Image (cartoon, rainbow, N blue to C red):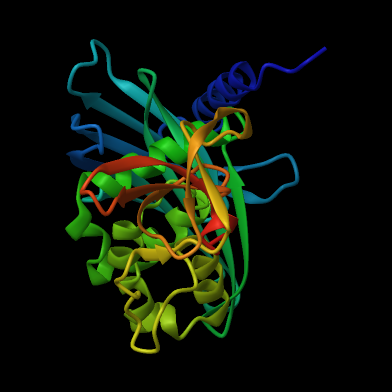
Amino acid sequence: MQRNHKFDFAIKNLFLLAFWLIFVPGAARAESVHGKFFNGQAYSGEYLVAEATNSDGMRVHPVTVRLKVDGEKFPLTYSYIADDIPSVKSNDAGFLLIVVNSGGMEGSVTYNYVVPIRGKLASIGTVQTTLHLGKIESIDVQSNKGLEKKEINELVEGIVRFNPSALSAPLNAYPTAILLLLGQGKFLTLADDSRLSKLYANKEISDDPVLLKAIKTVIGQDVQENGEAQASNRKVVVSNRAYFYNYPESSNIGKSYLIKGDVVNLVKKSDDGQYWLVDYVSSHGRKTEKWLRCEDIGYCR
């Protein structure tokens, strides 16, 4: 029988909340939080952090977030069990961030991204970075199993579009870089590549080779030594015949094509990275915007 991941995810959240209520009544401390999500919904409320002991006898810190969100009839809640005392931060890029720093310079830092999803508060996923002397030694990306990969990408895309200036703010460099690993960047346009490449220039990230390598695989490798992406989006057709596709699928090939040496402007890449939506202007000034295979322009990423 196929498991219902969304149902499992809902049950898990209920269990976490029940765990907190049973084991640590009255032991919590409350902090206020307010901001605006990437979909434009403003929120305000509080989060409560408590202390408890899990089944292995280890001390844990359940955290429960309770928010009044614009457009929602009832308050929305989210529960999470942290290994250490968590901090819950409202990020101006449009998400709620739960950060758990365990063990300091030789421990780990876990980033948990929370947003409204279908009328509920839910996590896009968590990214745990293991540290050695304060530098990232390894990265473990755990997407929310109750969401499809496409849906996670759409959520990350919404955040990237919400407040572009917030993404390049120095204080947001780490959360932004980590966030991109959850979506794998398949939605990114060349404009995003250029803008987000400012992350490379952030000293905290440039000094962490493991994280730097990870985000380069997401944003792209076309970065100059000064940390800025190459601005040109013009590519030359390398195939003798490069057929246009109406949609980025092999079954949607058209009859018209370009020839080797024709120049196109890249608009965006497909989710699977195998096609590019391009602008082509003929010698007669006629403009065409359709899909080409990445190998036909020698630019597969």
Residue 176: name its quadrant.
bottom left
In the current view of this chain or complex, which residue is farthest to the front? 284
Please give the name of the residue rendered at 24% of the width and 32% of the height, measured from the top-left corner.
39
Relative to 118, is 144 above or below?
A: below
Relative to 181, is 197 above or below?
A: below
Question: Residue 61: x percent and y percent?
Answer: 51, 46
Instruction: Decide if residue 297 is on the left or right side of residue 223.
Output: right
Locate the C terminus by quadrant. bottom right
Question: Residue 233: x percent and y percent?
Answer: 34, 64
Residue 15: name its quadrant.
top right
Q: Nearer the viewer, residue 167 or 237?
A: 237
User: Is residue 54 among what the camera can see?
Assistant: yes
Please give the name of the residue rendered at 56% of the width and 31% of the height, measured from the top-left corner.
23
Question: Residue 197: x percent and y percent?
Answer: 35, 70
Relative to 244, is 181 above or below?
A: below
Q: Nearer the viewer, residue 166 or 28?
A: 166
Number of marks present in the image shown: 0
In the current view of this chain or complex, which residue is farthest to the bottom? 225
Instruction: Decide if residue 199 is on the left or right side of residue 32.
Output: right
Q: Nearer the viewer, residue 88 or 147?
A: 147
Please give the name of the residue rendered at 51% of the width and 49% of the height, measured from the top-left corner.
182
Question: Residue 164: x percent and y percent?
Answer: 21, 55
Q: Nearer the viewer, residue 95 or 57?
A: 95
Please give the name of the residue rendered at 27% of the width and 28% of the height, measured from the top-left corner.
67
Relative to 150, is 233 above or below?
A: below
Locate the N terminus by quadrant. top right
